[in-house]
Amino acid sequence: MSHVMNTYKRLPLALERGAGCWVWDKQGKRYLDALAGIAVCGLGHSHPRLVRAITEQAGKLIHTSNLYEIDLQERLADRLAAISGMDEVFFCNSGCEANEAAIKIARLYGHGKGVEMPAIIVMDKAFHGRTIATLSATGSRKVQAGFEPLVPGFVRVPFDDLAAVRKVAENNRNVVAVLVELIQGEGGINICGADYLHGLREICAANGWLLMLDEVQSGTGRTGKWFAFQHSGVRPDVMTLAKGLASGVPIGACLAAGPAAGVFKPGNHGSTFGGNPLACAAALATLDIIESEKLMANATAMGDFLRDGFRARLEGIAGVHEIRGKGLMIGIELDLPCDDLVRHALDAGLLINVTNDNVIRLLPPLTMQRDEAEQLVTRLAPLITDFLASQRAAQAAVQPA
């Protein structure tokens, strides 16, 4: 019996090694990884340049503490600022920590403006983490249940609804910021409209609010740009990153610009492990590899190929509601719960995920090649078709005559 705390409903699968888009279990069975550790392993598995960077840094210095200057951290902050247009970076260890930092920046910013009870607008179906503050910001009762009392200071509105945000602006003088994912990952690969970010920027500017983007899942090249906001060209005041930033080595980052830059002063926030030399070396190597191997262009091309392939194979299939996504962040929405598909996919040698009960979520490595994308479509499409047919048959069998 394992002594690991029972916090995960794990699949009966233990992976032993990986190479590129492929992983092998302890019995030697090979799987095509279409999840990449939930958007973490953007370079695939065991990328030689990443392995070399981690190995070399581990042989020099793993951790020092933020009591001292860390050259690699400064280099990574400069690189992130250069590719994002942001002004400064705080490093931590995960996405929820990055979002905690964003929430603290918003509250400190609000207090600086004389707002005693600063509030942040958040969205239905959002996911920002599992700490007490970030689960309070998250738009999922499933995540929140049992952890009440929730942290106050969040005002929830429907996603991709500018009118709802404007209504809050008219009626709530405590609001100091908006926190939003441009593509809701855990919420079901929900994508905002083309004008949504521009509209949020206008509202924030008119009211003196901070525009804060959670790019934990959508950042670091996954959508075909370094960051999803770059498709719209509207720079946020705060942006959070994690997941794919160091290709599996834990790291998070909270970037600030404009009115949010300079809000944190020494003593306002901190992290023991945040921005340590090992994590920063892995992140710098990740950014170098994405750029030199043109992986953002590949994410765009492979994402288009996958969506077109699934649409062609699933066109006219009853129960397939929508196929959507940006780059290699793809959702196939069915009209019924489909968690069972994850195990069916395992049997077929595929690692996939289902989120929001009825959305098949695909987050393959940015290194995915055309033949691997073809295999993903060829293996998964018939599983979806067969699953939907079996569910329809089961429903028909229990219908009264």
Image (cartoon, rainbow, N blue to C red):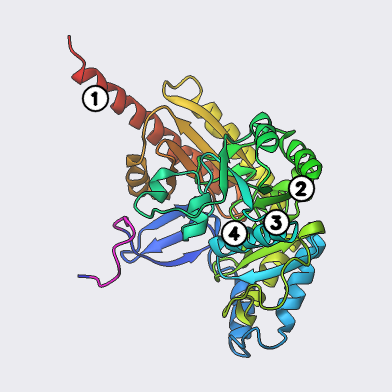
Q: Is residue 219 left or right of residue 38?
A: right
Q: CA distance from mark 4 to mark 2?
A: 20 Å
Residue indicated by mark 1: 394
In x, y percent, where is residue 171? 66, 35
At horizontal 78% and vertical 48% (from top left) the residue drawn is 208
Q: Is residue 136 above or below residue 245?
A: above
Residue 330, visible in the rendered structure: yes
Mark 3 neighbour density, 10 Å: few (under 14) some (14–19) many (20 or more): many
Residue nearest the observer in this picture, 156 or 347: 156
Residue type indicated by callout 3: Gly
Residue type indicated by callout 4: Asn
Q: Is residue 33 magenta?
A: no
Q: Which residues are magenta?
A: 2-12
Residue at 76% in and 76% down = 75
Disc 2 marks which residue? 230
Name which of mark 4 and mark 1 comes first in the sequence. 4
Residue under label 3, please give it.
110
**Residue positioned most to the bottom:** 60
The kind of secondary structure the magenta stretch mainly shows is loop
